[in-house]
Image (cartoon, grey):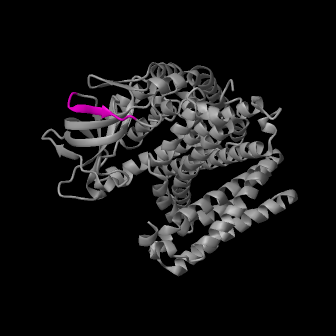
Amino acid sequence: MDNFFTDNPDIQWHFNHLDLEDVVASLERNYTEAEQYDDAPLSYADALEGYRAVLEMMGAITAREIAPLAPEVDREGAHFENGKVIYAKGTQRAMDILAKSSLMGMMLPRKYNGLNFPGLLYSMAIEMVAQADASLMNLFSLQDIAQTIYEFGDDNLKDRYLPEFASGKITGAMILTEPDAGSDLQAVRLKAVEQPDGTWKLYGVKRFITNGCADVSLVLARSEEGTVDGRGLSMFLCEKCPELVIRRIEHKLGIHGSPTCELQFNGVPAVLVGQRRMGLIRYVMALMNGARVAVASQAVGIAQAAYEEALKYARKRVQFKRPIIEIPQVYDMLARMKSQIQVARAITYEASRLVDRRRMLERQLEEKPDAALRARLKEVSSWASVLTPIAKAYASEMAVRVTCDAIQIHGGAGYMREFNVERLARDARITTIYEGTTQLQVVGASVGITSGAFGNYLAQLGERGFRPELAQLASLARESREKLSSCVTFLKDFNDRTYSELVSRRLVDMACDALGVHLMLLQAERDPARTAAAEKFTRDALPRIRMQADYITSGDKLVIDKREELL
């Protein structure tokens, strides 16, 4: 591919059907931004033209300049020398290119030299960066640090740091994880001690910190002495300094260009961000939700790269006197890979769209309190809250499957380092783990599914009129809703928490498939050319949905009752 944006028909389709008119109008303050900034759009059409130009530039940069650097970045990796982290040469070059192209502040307002993009367009950009180099995406997507400062920091913090982030002069990190507190962030122990002048100092150790060598970091620390849960945690901002010691960087299976650090805080000077005690329950949750959508986009980009490699190889590799793409097992595998990528992209973009809509409603409610707006915000928030973990879970697990299939299509050659699919499979594996494991996403998604919020969302997607030729697909979509609803009802009536936890992954897998069926059906309704893709995924998904429903409603507790014998 010469351009990861213009040469990808699926991304092009999504861009041409954005459905963001009200979101963009809100971002652009009904296009009054144009009165102050020369680059601000005058209308929705003008905004779309600007978005397209930026994404075309991103597509060209990632395909032509960054992707060729990725193999060497993987081989060289980030270095740790004399207590300092040094990026691989290709990583530093790629970061310089992105900074010079003004792509490091995509969602920040123009006031801070940002591009003022909606999150959905940012997700597209993240995907393209990940397609080129998954490890670079980890650095590029840390724009979420700047976004968090924008949303929760005071004017002094915004004015001081946001223009620097937008220009690419500084990098960021979110410092959450500790040796004894992985996914359980309520157990964070890093200590924050308030100083007489109102500043703070941080003491303790953090581990598995992506880009822990950053210039500016947001840190989750315990500000309330004597507390043991999330209510005692606050968020702090600190800069790189002698008191912040990088103890080592990790040697990892993949994403070698992204340094993962262990940090020692020896009285690091810090500034409180927002209110005390709100660090985890509000600020970090907002930050991590953004990071989870970003990882979903990363996973889609990795899978797209693997699919392209597998397709290219299958077309040129000749066995038994014919290209292997003509072998049914191979072209079925490729069709399944493409279908799963399309669905993961649809789910991820829909999650991004709902987050954009939630932000829009929050802004509108701040400007004009209104009961109807508040009710709408509550509804959209419930949908965004369940689609975010679903997107992360589905896309990351999909990326692992697709990259493994890409190696399989390459045969023995795919296991060799000279082929990109070997690197892509290693890079994909982390997406199911960081920013919350798939199992943690299942916990988050299950709440929205069992509460009925997800069922209501599926209903508003599927309970509408469809073209007659889509009647069978619409019927299968309705079956998927009914199967999911029957499982939720069964679990409530069964009233066994351990059993519900046991089958929760199956329930979320069902929800992912049902959502994919509905989103692909809507695509087919909007564009008849998408019908075959909708049929492919639906025919693959419904047998899985039926199987999961049968298992969940069986009430089979063998694993619970005889776990001692089975383990």
Q: How many marks?
A: 0
User: Quick one: quadrant of the N terminus?
Assistant: top right
Q: Which residue of the protein is positioned furthest toward the right in this rendering?
A: 468
Q: Which residue of the protein is positioned furthest toward the left in this rendering?
A: 196
x, y percent for residue 489: 58, 76
x, y percent for residue 218: 33, 39
| 401 on left or right of 272 | right
Q: Residue at x 73, y 62 (%)?
A: 477
Report if residue 248 lies within the magenta region.
yes
x, y percent for residue 405: 64, 43
x, y percent for residue 537: 73, 53
Rendered view: 60 above or below 336:
above
Q: Residue at x 67, y 54 (%)?
A: 516
User: Quick one: quadrant of the C terminus?
Assistant: bottom left
Q: Which residue of the protein is positioned furthest toward the front in this rendering?
A: 320
Rendered view: 98 above or below 172:
above
User: Where are the magenta residues, as a range?
Assistant: 242-251
Camera sees residue 27: no
Q: Quadrant of residue 482?
A: bottom right
Rendered view: 409 above or below 77:
below
Task: Name the dominant secondary structure of the magenta segment.
Answer: strand
Q: Looking at the image, which is closer to me, 458 or 418?
A: 418
| 127 on left or right of 90 | right
Report if residue 183 lies within the magenta region.
no
Q: Residue at x 38, y 39 (%)?
A: 149
Q: Residue at x 81, y 50 (%)?
A: 531
Camera sees residue 503: yes
